[in-house]
Each structure stands twice: as structure tokens, then as C-alpha cells.
Amino acid sequence: MKPRFSIKKCFYAVIAVAFFAFIFLVSAPHIRAQNAALLNGYTVVIDPGHGGVDGGVTGTYTRNKESDINLYISRALRTVLKKRGYRVIMTRNDENGLYDEGAGSKKLSDMNRRREIIEEAAPSLVVSVHQNFYPSPMVSGAQVFYAPSAAESERVASVMQKKLCEVLGGDREHKSADYYILRCSPYPSVLVECAFMSNEREDRLLNTSAYRQKTALAIADGIDASLAENVAKARVPLD
Ligand SMILES: [Zn+2]
């Protein structure tokens, strides 16, 4: 009678077990790394301004398109936030706008789609990323906007403005402004004008990936600081 387990079969079985053990050991660090990037419970919508036929403003000195700079900074911001455990939703993730090609008003169609994405995400915070422009080339500095009479957005804008001044320089104050993206949803929303593309120094800085990364990191720190304050406030007893 033939033995049920031949030496040859046992040999193959050992090889198979060793193979799967090896695969497990090799992949285990990746699994651990995934588990380490635990979500922190906050969702942030990043809204890179403009796109498609709407390039936004143009750098006076570099001729860069605002829509491209906004997308670059937004993607860098997404990377940083994901590493810090945020759930991140982008309103756009390529150079195209969000409008329907056949829409009567591309601007309206684009803004409506952004609102829908924000509403679907139900975020803790919306951060719209833009670049500024002013007729006088002397004007510079990051500027944060919030919708009038939106108390929580104003608080976040104040924290964000301080952080941007601290990291990028300048002494601007946060301001209210009637922008659609800031008032189209019930979620706290700020619009960050990172720098002036009409100012030579800032236009040239924005032309470097180092400064775009630095800006993204400053915005991420602003988000961290504003939400941490929120958590601390929530811990205060209500009596
Ligand atoms: Zn813009």
C-alpha cells in the first residue's frame, strides 16, 4: 500500500508553508504601517480654486496660472493631512473644472458641483485654496477669508491667519467676504489666499515646489491648531 504522505509531498508542503510565512513576514510591516495611520475623526474638504477654462489670476512675473498653483498646494496639503489621520476629500484632483461642458453658465455649474461634493462629505472643515492679485505690486501676504456672520468659520480663519503669518510672514488680519464657496454649505469654511501673484517676490516663491510645500504645511498646521482648539473647548464642562 502506498503511504498517504510521501516524503515528496511533505517536502512540497514544507516549501509552501515557508513561502506563505515569508510573504506574511514581508507584508506585515506594511499592514502595521496602515494600522498606524489611524483616522483622527476629522474630515477636511480641500477645494483647489478654479480649473479648466477658468485659470484664475496669472503671475505677473512667472505667467503661472493660479489654478495650477492651487492644485499643487492642495495635493501637497492632502498628503500632509492624510499622514496626520484626516479623511480628505478634494473637490477637484486634476486641471479640469467641475462644470458640465454643455452648461449655460460654466461658473454656476462648477460651483454647484463643489457644493454637492462638500455636502456629500459632511466635513469638519472646508479649506478653499487660492492665490491673490492686486493692481499694486507692493501688496503681499497670505489672507484668510470667512463668510460674514459665520462664527465658527471666523474662529478657524483667525487661527489659520495667525499660523500663516507665523510661518510665511506678513501681518494681515482675517477678513469676511461674500464668496459662494464660504456660504454654500453649513460647514465651517475658510478661503486661503496663500500669496499675491502680482507681487514679484511671492510670484517667484510660488514658482518653487519648496515654497508650495511650505505653504501646504502651514495650512495643515492651521487646520490642526483650529481643530485642536475645538476639541479643547468641547472638553470644558458646561455647568
Ligand atoms: Zn482664485
Image (spheres, grey):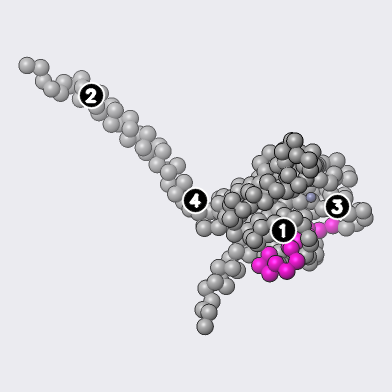
**Earlier-in-chain disc, 1 versus 2:** 2
Front-most of residues 131 and 32: 131
| SS label for mark 3 | loop
Q: In this view, does 14 lie to the left or right of 36?
A: left
Please say if the residues under marks 4 and 2 sit with CB atoms less than 8 Å apart.
no
The residue that mark 2 highlights is 11
Which span of residues is magenta-colored?
140-153
The residue that mark 1 highlights is 182
Please say if the residues under marks 1 and 2 sit with CB atoms less than 8 Å apart.
no
Amino acid type indicated by mark 4: Ala
Q: In this view, does 201 lie to the left or right of 97?
A: right
User: Which tag is nearer the camera, tag 3 or tag 4?
Assistant: 3
Q: Distance between the residues labelled 2 and 3?
A: 73 Å
> Which residue is depicted at the point 68% across and 46% down?
113
The residue that mark 3 highlights is 133
Q: How far apart are marks 1 and 2 (CA)?
A: 67 Å
Q: Distance between the residues labelled 4 and 2?
A: 40 Å
User: Which tag is nearer the camera, tag 1 or tag 2?
Assistant: 1
Amino acid type indicated by mark 1: Leu
Amino acid type indicated by mark 3: Phe
Q: Distance between the residues labelled 1 and 4?
A: 30 Å
